[in-house]
Image: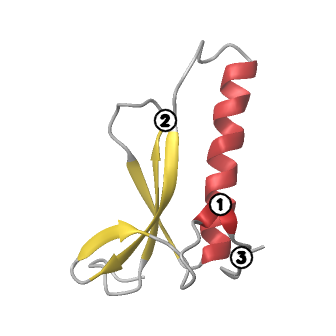
Amino acid sequence: MSAQPVTGDLRVWHAPQVPGKPFHVRVASIGDAKLVLSALADYDLFQLANNIKPDYCNAAGLEVFDDGEWCEWTSDDGYSIDEVDAEGVHA
């Protein structure tokens, strides 16, 4: 991935504590995005279960770079990252 985003680049965003500032992780594919999102969710649940974080309100998603800005990603059929498989196909 290039340092400067180009049209079609993907990145996961994750706010570990809403309304805190999210961080971003560039990913190469929908499958990679799903893996990163799953790992972040598992990590937050681990922290909660082990009293590392007493409570939290997190949020996460996938963005695509389009027309010079980062936008929330949806499939060609309008489905979110949570509604598609690793290839971006509605399950």
Q: Is residue 5 left or right of residue 13?
A: left
Amino acid type, residue under disc 2 in the picture: Pro
Total count of labels = 3
| Residue at image mark 2 | 16
Q: Position of residue 88 (x, y in %)?
A: 65, 79
Q: Position of residue 69 (x, y in %)?
A: 24, 73
Q: CA distance from mark 2 to mark 3?
A: 27 Å
Label 2, residues with CA under 10 Å away: few <14, some 14-19, many ≥20: some
| Disc 2 versus disc 1: nearer the observer | 1
Residue 68 lies, with reference to residue 41, above or below; the image says below
Amino acid type, residue under disc 1 in the picture: Asp
Rendered image: mark on residue 82 = 1
Looking at this view, name the residue that lies furthest to the left: 68
Give 34 or 75, whichever is nearer the viewer: 75
Q: Position of residue 50 (x, y in %)?
A: 74, 17
Q: Position of residue 82 (x, y in %)?
A: 65, 60
Rendered image: mark on residue 90 = 3
Q: CA distance from mark 1 to mark 3?
A: 9 Å
